[in-house]
Image: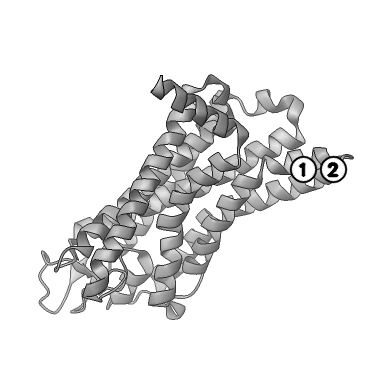
């Protein structure tokens, strides 16, 4: 990043945060600190439960455990720095720190997206082709899907960060956000960002829309298959195995589409910060509750783990 108009290369950026009101800093710190603790503890519990119960060593729970791990990484990229800035007067982040945060944020967010698509494929095979499930969703294929998710996501992040590193920035260093996200940083650039925006929008469409379309296609096939089941109980049982996943998909993609699939001119500081909090903090925190409270196997495994700890 090239800085113009005498701005020191060591001064970096200023993260405005969620609110500039000094009276709100400590209450916001308390709220987001508790939310971060709940996120980490909840997702670690999901991983431990799946690891400790051999009955849960299936493709669905393999992807769920990796989703929980990615959620921990995803929220850790953003929240700790936000918490530090809530108690700090400077609220600064270095240029290198901004690029690093941007890279890992996008990498983990996109991996989340591809893991949700992998889980949709798993449900598709389980409901539409149950007799060949063990063959189709074998361990090797699951690992390849996970590896592909990580590789595509990190390649996407690298391209985006390299594009951002080529931009020049003028006197204003205040990022109107609580972390280094693409849109608010692009707003500060005094370079011509039109070509970068075209590349970003095109490449983002390819990376984010692909898993989303995969999820839509999977559930379209699932709905068609379930509607052919003669009994109402059979239909409910089939749909119930997908309910947790559908809930997470709606929470995650609803806020992501709102934030990223609009031109830069339509960027709104307040509205986008609220939407970003939804998928960076709220969704990773709710995932363990969604998957444990609506899943009998997870609830039984949690009880067994609790009893094992207390015994």
**Residue contact at pointers 2 and 1, CB within 8 angstroms:** yes
Q: How is the image coloured?
A: one colour
Percent of width and height locating residue 26: 24, 65
Q: Residue at x 42, y 40 (%)?
A: 43
Q: Quadrant of residue 73?
A: top left
49, above or below 250, in the image: above
Answer above or below: position of 172 versus 297. Answer: below
Position of the C terminus by quadrant? top left
Q: CA distance from mark 2 to mark 1?
A: 6 Å
- Left/right placement of residue 243 relative to residue 62 reads right
Task: Using the rendered image of the protein, determine whether residue 158 is visible from the camera's viewpoint.
Answer: no
Residue shown at 40% from the left, 56% from the top: 281
Toward the viewer: 176 or 141? 176
Res. 125 visible in picture: yes
Farthest front residue?
A: 311
- Assign a secondary structure to mark 1: helix
Q: Which residue is mark 2?
A: 232
Residue 96 vertical placement versus 21 (above, below): above
Counting from the top left corner in percent of width and height, residue 187 is at: 33, 76
User: What mark, if any, has residue 236 been given in the picture?
Assistant: 1
Left or right: 141 with respect to 265? right
Mark 1 crowd level (few <14, some 14–19, many ≥20, 10 Å Cα) = few
Q: Secondary structure at mark 2?
A: helix
Give the quarter of the figure containing the N terminus: bottom left
Q: Residue 300's quadrant in the figure?
A: top right
Label 2 Cα neighbours within 10 Å, binned few <14 / some 14-19 / many ≥20: few
Q: Residue at x 47, y 41 (%)?
A: 67
Above or below, 153 against 258 in this view is above
């Amino acid at each position: 990043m090239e800085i113009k108009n005498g701005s020191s290369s060591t001064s970096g950026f200023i993260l405005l945060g969620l609110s500039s009101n000094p009276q709100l800093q400590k209450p916001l710190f308390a709220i987001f600190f508790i939310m971060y603790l709940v996120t980490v503890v909840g997702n670690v519990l999901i991983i431990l439960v799946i690891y400790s119960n051999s009955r849960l060593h299936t493709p669905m729970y393999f992807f769920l455990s990796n989703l929980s791990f990615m959620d921990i990484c995803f929220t850790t990229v953003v929240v700790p720095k936000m918490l530090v800035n809530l108690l700090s007067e400077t609220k600064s982040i270095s240029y290198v720190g901004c690029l690093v945060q941007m890279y890992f944020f996008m990498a983990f967010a996109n991996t989340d997206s591809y893991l949700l698509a992998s889980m949709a494929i798993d449900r598709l095979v389980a409901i539409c082709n149950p007799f060949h499930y063990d063959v189709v969703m074998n361990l090797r294929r699951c690992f390849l899907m996970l590896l592909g998710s990580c590789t595509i996501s990190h390649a996407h992040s690298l391209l985006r960060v390299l594009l951002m590193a080529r931009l020049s920035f003028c006197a204003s260093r205040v990022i109107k956000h609580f972390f280094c996200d693409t849109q608010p940083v692009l707003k500060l650039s005094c370079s011509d960002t039109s070509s970068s925006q075209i590349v970003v929008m095109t490449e983002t469409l390819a990376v984010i829309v692909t898993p989303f379309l995969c999820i839509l296609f999977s559930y379209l096939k699932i709905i068609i298959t379930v509607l052919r089941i003669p009994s109402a109980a059979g239909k409910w049982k089939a749909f119930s195995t997908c309910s947790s996943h559908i809930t997470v998909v709606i929470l995650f993609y609803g806020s992501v589409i709102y934030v990223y699939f609009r031109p830069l001119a339509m960027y709104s500081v307040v509205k986008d910060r609220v939407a970003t909090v939804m998928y960076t903090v709220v969704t990773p925190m709710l995932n363990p509750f969604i998957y444990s409270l609506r899943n009998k196997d997870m609830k039984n495994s949690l009880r067994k783990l609790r009893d094992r700890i207390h015994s």
